[in-house]
């Protein structure tokens, strides 16, 4: 019975969640147009990150992640491997959907693949959807809010210190993901912290090992 | 959602494979390798691991240190690009990762999978290349001794296609291991600066730091 109340309470809490209010800029900033923060990739880029997986604040394991993102075509591929080099998950996402190349348990579910691809899109690609609001949060962060076509909301905000956060909410305003970019001007993706609020909450701390802009090989040379 | 009993299925596949009959060839050559390897009591070596796959433009290079003491103690320590240590000693295997400058135990199923892998690695150090019935072992003599292990079970296709091990003719120690996962993906580990039969402090197989 307690469990039922807990589930009911959680449901009510989630369904009644509201998006954080966005305010007009203060008088000192009034008149200045708000530029939406945009740390997102502009060129086809390959990034290799060390990924520390945390649950309940404790480190659980470490992996190596490789991501190849083409922001123009909005296609990407990724691989996740153990330190010892064993590939645990490899997939790509493009116009024809998500294609899993290799997935070892427990990474072999459709839900995991879809979540992983959604997270990569959230982190590296400019959000698509209608820009519904620009302004500032109570703490002073500049924020731009978009409504996604398939439902849900994405806020991209820049703090006064220049650090950027990306937040994804459900259609009903429940926070699902928070991405903190603690990189520098040279590479916003030097350190990425992704907090997932899901059936199991977890945090990924991704530290850049290397990145490179990828030039496509001309068709004639392929 | 992520659950962290990862690789369990791979471990189970390996376990199931153990029931398959032994398919070994060139028994005399393998017996000779076993005999030569008896002289090895310890190995300390640096290693360079190169991971190649389609998504990478060039191999991802990892480096570390390898320690072995007969019959089955192993410390497999990565220093770059990601620090991690697997220690297998007296039947217990633990994996540690670096977090906030400290080494902490990996609480997923990764250590148990590594226990299976390191069991094989310890066997190779002992010259027992044909002892795992999950693999067909073929030995080829030449300027270098090459042993090719091929999974018996076709269900391993896509996980491991074959493993190639090269052996030093001088001291029968393992020089390199090449794990071919598919036509587009492989892991190559080269052992360098190997020191044979020099005493290793037992703490190497007990303390993570």
Image (spheres, rainbow, N blue to C red):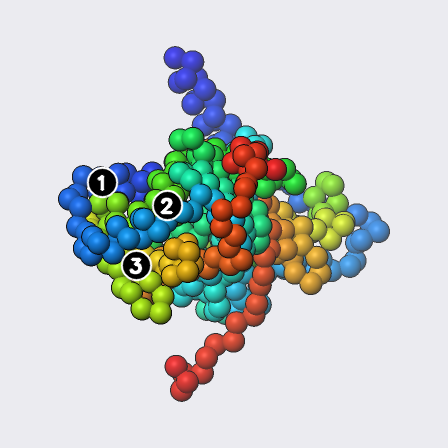
Whether labels 1 and 3 belong to a single chain: the reply is yes
| Quadrant into which the N terminus of chain A falls | top left
Q: CA distance from mark 1 to mark 3?
A: 20 Å
Please name the residue that numbered disc 2 is placed on: B38
Residue B199 lies, in percent from the top left, at: 54, 42
Q: Using the rendered view, name the quadrant where residue B41 is placed.
A: top left
Instruction: Bin the neighbour count of mark 1 within 10 Å (Cα to Cα): few under 14, some 14-19, many 20 and up.
Output: some
**Which residue corresponds to the image point at 52% horizontal and 49% vertical from the top-left?**
B44
> Eyeballing the image, is B158 above or below B89?
below
Chain name for mark 3? B
Residue B184 lies, in percent from the top left, at: 35, 65
Q: CA distance from mark 2 to mark 3?
A: 18 Å
- Whether residue A80 sits left or right of residue A52 in the image: it is left
Q: Is residue A96 visible?
A: no
> Eyeballing the image, is B19 above or below B55?
above
**Which residue corresponds to the image point at 30% horizontal and 59% vertical from the top-left?**
B147
Whether labels 2 and 1 belong to a single chain: the reply is yes
Instruction: Bin the neighbour count of mark 3 within 10 Å (Cα to Cα): few under 14, some 14-19, many 20 and up.
Output: many
Sequence order check: which comes first, mark 2 or mark 1?
A: 1
Most foreground residue, A94 or A105: A105
Number of the label disc, if any, that sits on residue B18: 1
Cβ–Cβ under 8 Å for marks 2 and 3: no
> Eyeballing the image, is A89 above or below B199?
below
Sequence order check: which comes first, mark 2 or mark 3?
A: 2
Disc 2 versus disc 1: nearer the observer: 2
Please name the residue that numbered disc 3 is placed on: B147
Disc 1 versus disc 3: nearer the observer: 3
Most foreground residue, A26 or A110: A110
**Which residue corresponds to the image point at 79% horizontal and 54% vertical from the top-left?**
A30
């Amino acid at each position: 019975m307690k469990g039922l109340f807990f589930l009911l309470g959680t449901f009510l809490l989630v369904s009644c969640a509201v998006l954080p209010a966005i305010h007009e800029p203060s008088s000192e900033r009034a008149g200045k147009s708000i530029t939406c923060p945009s740390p997102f990739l502009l060129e086809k880029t390959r990034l290799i990150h060390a990924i520390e997986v945390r649950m309940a604040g404790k480190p659980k394991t470490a992996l190596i992640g490789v991501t190849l993102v083409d922001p123009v075509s909005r296609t990407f591929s990724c691989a996740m491997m153990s330190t010892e080099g064993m590939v645990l998950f490899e997939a790509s996402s493009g116009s024809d959907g998500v294609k899993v190349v290799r997935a070892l348990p427990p990474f072999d579910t459709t839900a995991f693949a879809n979540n992983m691809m959604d997270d990569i899109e959230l982190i590296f690609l400019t959000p698509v959807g209608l820009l519904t609001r620009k302004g500032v949060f109570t703490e002073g962060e500049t924020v731009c809010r978009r409504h996604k076509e398939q439902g849900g909301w994405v806020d991209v905000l820049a703090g006064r210190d220049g650090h950027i956060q990306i937040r994804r909410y459900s259609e009903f305003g429940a926070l699902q993901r928070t991405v903190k970019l603690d990189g520098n001007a040279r590479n916003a993706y030097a350190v990425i912290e992704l907090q997932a609020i899901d059936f199991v909450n977890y945090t990924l701390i991704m530290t850049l090992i290397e990145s490179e802009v990828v030039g496509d090989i001309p068709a004639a040379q392929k | 959602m992520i659950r962290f009993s990862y690789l369990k299925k791979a471990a189970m596949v390996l376990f199931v494979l153990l029931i398959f009959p032994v398919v070994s060839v060139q028994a005399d050559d393998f017996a000779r390798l076993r005999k030569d390897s008896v002289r090895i009591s310890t190995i300390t070596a640096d290693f360079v691991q190169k991971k190649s796959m389609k998504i990478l433009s060039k191999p991802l290079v990892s480096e570390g240190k390898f320690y072995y003491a007969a019959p089955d103690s192993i410390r497999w320590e990565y220093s770059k690009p990601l620090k991690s240590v697997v220690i297998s000693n007296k039947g217990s295997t633990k994996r540690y990762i670096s977090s906030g400058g400290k080494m902490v135990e990996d609480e997923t199923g990764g250590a148990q999978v590594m226990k299976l892998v390191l069991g094989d690695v310890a066997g190779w150090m002992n010259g027992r290349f044909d002892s795992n019935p999950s693999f067909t072992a073929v030995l080829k003599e030449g300027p270098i001794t090459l042993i090719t292990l091929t999974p018996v079970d076709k269900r391993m296709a896509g996980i491991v296609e074959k493993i190639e091990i090269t052996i030093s003719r001088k001291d029968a120690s393992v020089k390199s291991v090449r794990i071919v996962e598919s036509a587009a993906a492989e892991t190559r580990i080269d052992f360098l600066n190997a020191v044979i039969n020099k005493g290793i402090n037992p703490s190497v197989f007990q303390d993570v730091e």
